[in-house]
Image (tube, rainbow, N blue to C red):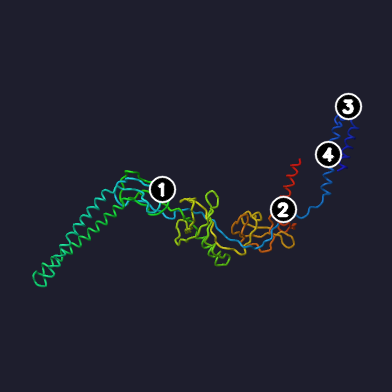
Amino acid sequence: MHRNISSHFSRLTALEGTSGGKSMQAKANAYSPCHVVLLLGILLLLTAGGCKQKGGPPQGDPEVAVVTIHPERVVITTELPGRTSAFRIAEIRPQVNGLIQKRLFTEGSDVKAGQVLYQIDPAPFQAILDSASASLGRAEAGLGSIRLRAERYHDLLADKAVSQQDYDDALSAMKQAEAEIKFYQASVKTARINLGYTHVTAPISGRIGKSSVTDGALVMAYQPIALATIQQLDPIYVDVPQSTTEMLRLKHRLEDGRLHHDGTNQNKVKLILEDGTAYPLEGILQFQDITVDPTTGSVILRVVFPNPQSALLPGMFVRAVITEGVNEQAILIPQQGISRTPKGDPFALVVDADNKVQQRTLTLDRAIGSKWLVSSGLNPGDRVIVEGVQKARPGAPVKVVPFAAAHKEGPAVEKAVQLSETTN
């Protein structure tokens, strides 16, 4: 490079020597001191770049952070969407025809079983009860004389003072009078029941909704439109659909021994509300339906949750965290240690005993927190690269650093930067 610059200056000088006076003067004016300084600067830069390229130190093996695989005990859970429903629902309908005289509850309040909700005009039913009672009294009053006649005819029949026909007629009249008494007794009972139905009461305890009628409304017995609805909210149901595919997969895992039941905790269920917060109380898995919904291909899991503060309302969408079982030899690796091929297949880079990189194709089960649960592809003792994956190439040597140590350096560096900024 020095020789090229020198020859350039030599040719330039020769050209100046062969030119005439004015030409030489023009060229002398063209090459001012600024041009000379510029050419010298370019010469120095080229020289420094050539020295750096030829004399730089060789780079070492790339540094990567790894985690060593250790099987651990993990409780396997699944998160399924669900919907709340009332523990008990009672639709209030009248059982007699009549006019609503008074509504006796506050909409949206809690009511007790047996509490009177509506008062239907009782006057017509009271009149029917009085009429039935009078008819019963008349029948009971006539029964005494008819019974005495039948008894006398029975005694006279032995002496043949009366005919058999007279006795049979007296006995029949007595039985007819007794039957009439029973009929009127039933009529009185029916009238009394209907009179009681004029007091529309709550069949269960719970929270009552809005009323569909007001005072003065005419209602019909067993009408299709309910007067109001009572729902028991404590406890409350959470119905969770589970696909049959997931159900069969869980069954196979338990049969293969990859999962084990968690004893008493197996039926405990946690709940996540619509805003992402956790419900503070745990529920109990009550039963699993045996009928598959043909439209969704799922079965219903019903969970019972205590709801003392009425935080859960019927119809809310929630997420239930259900315990599937326990994996005693689970392999978990941080999610940043997983890469994917262009086809989307997951793989990880591991460091072998010679500190060389190897690529392993994996089968992933699910994400647990910030880690992946690996079903196959890794073995206990494998060192998986979780930091510096971009530097590592399969078959190339690397320098191994523990993953925990790499993370400990982060806060120290950050603290140093903060101290530096504070000092400045």
Which residue bears the numbered disc 4? 42
x%, y% of residue 401? 73, 56
The nearer-to-camera label among 2 and 4 is: 2
- Residue appearing at x 84%, y 46% in the figure: 51
Q: Residue furthest top?
A: 22
Q: Nearer the viewer, mark 1 or mark 4?
A: 1
Q: Residue at x 22, y 61 (%)?
A: 182
- Residue at 74% across, 54% down: 63
Q: Nearer the viewer, mark 3 or mark 4?
A: 4
**116 sits left or right of 31 in the view:** left
Name the kind of residue labelled 4 in the image: Ile
Cα distance between the residues tagged 2 and 4: 46 Å
Q: Amino acid at mark 1?
A: Gly
Q: Is residue 298 visible?
A: no
Q: Position of residue 88 (x, y in %)?
A: 42, 55
Q: In this view of the protein, which residue sits in the foreground, 33 or 402?
A: 402
The numbered dot on residue 408 is 2
Q: Please tell me which of labels 2 and 4 falls first in the chain.
A: 4
Which mark sits nearer the N-terminus, 2 or 3?
Answer: 3
- Mark 3 and mark 1 lie on one chain; the one further toward the N terminus is 3
Give the class, few, some or many, for how many residues have Cα within 10 Å of label 4's Cα (few <14, many ≥20).
few
Q: Secondary structure at mark 2?
A: helix
Q: CA distance from mark 3 to mark 1?
A: 112 Å
Q: Quadrant of residue 335?
A: bottom right
